[in-house]
Amino acid sequence: MAKYIFITGGVISSLGKGIATASIAKILESCGFKVSLIKFDPYLNVDPGTMNPYQHGEVYVTSDGAETDLDLGHYERFTNARLNRLNNVTTGQIYSTVLARERKGEYLGKTIQVIPHITNEIKERIHIVAKESKAEIILMEIGGTVGDIESLPFLEAARQFSLERGRENVIYIHLTLVPYIKVADEIKTKPTQHSVGTMREIGIQPDILLCRTEKTLSDDLKAKISLFCNVQANAVIEALDVATIYEIPLVFKNQGLDKIILRHFGLKPKHTDLKDWQEKVVDRVLHPKHKTTIAVVGKYIELQDAYKSIYEALRHGGIANDCQVEIKKIDAESIELEGAEKILAGIQGLLIPGGFGYRGIEGKIKAIQYARENKLPFFGICLGMQCAAIEFARSVLGLKRANSSEFIKYGKEPVISLLEEQRKIKLMGGSMRLGEYPCRLAKAGKAYQAYRKPLVYERHRHRYEFNNRYRRRFLKKGMLFSGIYPKKNLVEILELKEHPWFVGVQFHPEFQSKPDKAHPLFDQFIRASMLFAARRGA
Ligand code: GLN
C-alpha cells in the first residue's frame, strides 16, 4: 500500500509550496522510492486552460494534453514522475463529477452533501492516482492557505484519509511563515501558532513544519515552535531563503527531513544520493564560468509566473553550458513604441514565448526582424514561431499583409491559419491541439543537430498552424522546414538556413526541460548566444 503526504500552507500565499512539495518528492526519490504528486486547486474552474494569465500564471501542459497548474511543472522538473490529467484536481472537476452522477440518479435519492459526497470524490481521486501511478509515496499539495473557505473540503478529505488508511501511513506537512520584524529585531512565531491552531480546529495535527524565514532560527526558537505547535523539535524544519530553488532539496535533506518522513512510515531508504544534483545542478548555478543575456519579449512580462517554464528552461540551458543566463524581460509593446534597435542593444539572444491575442504582436515582429537581420540567435516558441513566419513573409517575400487568421480573420495573406477541419468546432478549447505529438526531423537542420535523433515527441497548446499554401515560397527564399508532424504534414519547426541560429517551434519544448537534463534546443540556443557574444567581442 502507498504512503501519503499532505502539504498545506499557512499565514500567507506565495511561500513556495509548490517548490517545497517538489523538493520533498525529490529527496524521497533520491532515497529510492517511486513518487507521484497531486495538486489540489480549490477554485471552481474545471482547469486553468481558459483562465487569464493575470489570474493564474502559466498553464502547464502534460504529455496527455491536460492544461494544468504550473506547480506540476515544478514536480516534473524536480522528479522523474510522469504526470497527467489525474494529477491536477480542481473543485470544478469534483463538483462536475458529483453533479453528473446525481443527475443520472446514481445516489438513489439521497441528499448530496459536501461531507461525505464531495470529500469521497476527492479521496477517490487520490486512490486513482495511487493505483495508476503505482507510486510508493503520493505527495499532495493543497492549494491556497489554511483558513480559506474554499479549501475546507480538501482539508476535511485529508483528515479523513488517515482514519481510513491508518495514521502511520499519512503525514501532514505544514508550510508556514516565521517573519522577522525589523523594528523589534525579533523573529515572530505567533502567525505559525495561529495557523497550526486553525489546522487543529479542522482536526489535523501537522507532523512537520517547514518554516519559511529570512533569518536563521535558533534552537530556542525551534523549541518554542515545537512546544506551542505540538510538533517534535527535530520536525521543525528551517526553510531559509536561498539563491536558487534547486538548492531546496539539499536544505531539507541536510536537516534530515527524509529520515523523519521515512521513520514515520516505517520505511528504510534503499539508497540515498543527491551528489549529482549538488554537483551538476546547484554548484553550476552558483558558480558559473560564463555569462549571457537573453531577452524574452512577451506580453505578460511584469507577471513573474506567466512564463515560468520558459525562464527555468533558459536556466537549464545555462547549466548545460556552465553559463549564467541573465533574463531581460521586455514588454513587446515597448518595442512598438521605441524600436528594436534601442531595446535589444547589448543582448545575445532573443526568445519569443507563446501567447494568444493581437496585443504586442507588431513589437514581437519588429524584434524578430532585428534578430534575423543582425544574426542574433532567435528562438521562437509557438506564437513566437508564428510571428517569425509572419515577419519572413512580410520582409522577405514582400507579402505586406501577411498575418495570422487569429488576428485578422479574413486577411489577404493568412500565413498562419486554422485547418479546415478546425473551423467547425465552436466550444472554447475544443479546437486546440493539445499534448504530445511526434515530430520528424530533417537531417540538414539545427534541430536535428540538437536532438541527434530523427523522431521526437513534444507538447502542444495552440489552435493555429503554418499554412502549407506558403511552404514553397518560404523554401525558395531560404527557410527550412526542419520538423514536420508526419500524419497531417504540419510544420513543427522552421529555421533560417543563412543564420547562425534562428529556430521557431510550434510546440512547447520548455515543458520537458530539467535542471540536470536541459532540453536540447535550449542547450543549443544558449550555446549560440555565447558564440554570438564571442563573435561580437572578437
Ligand atoms: N495563439 C496561437 C495559437 O493558438 C499560439 C498559441 C501559443 O503560443 N501557445 O495557435
Image: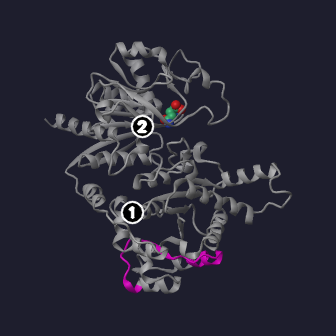
Q: Nearer the viewer, residue 304 or 380?
A: 380
In-image side of 317 versus 413 (left or right)? left
Which residue in the rendered view is the most extreme toward the right? 109
Note whether ligand 1 is within 8 Å of mark 2. Answer: no
Which quadrant of the figure has residue 399? Answer: top left
Disc 1 secondary structure class: loop
Q: Residue at x 53, y 48 (%)?
A: 84
Q: Residue at x 43, y 65 (%)?
A: 24
Q: Any mark on residue 32, and which?
A: 1
Q: Relative to 413, is 265 above or below?
A: below
Q: Amino acid at mark 2?
A: Ser
The CA distance from mark 1 to mark 2 is 49 Å
Image position, residue 85 (x, y; %) = 57, 48
Q: Quadrant of the N terminus?
A: bottom right
Q: Residue at x 35, y 21 (%)?
A: 480
Image position, residue 535 (x, y; %) = 17, 34
Image position, residue 153 (x, y; %) = 67, 64
Q: Which residue is mark 2?
A: 334
Mark 2 closeness class: few <14, some 14–19, many ≥20 residues within 10 Å: some
Q: Is residue 201 magenta?
A: yes
Part of the protein shown in magenta = 196-220
Which quadrant of the figure has residue 160? Answer: bottom right
Image position, residue 94 (x, y; %) = 68, 54
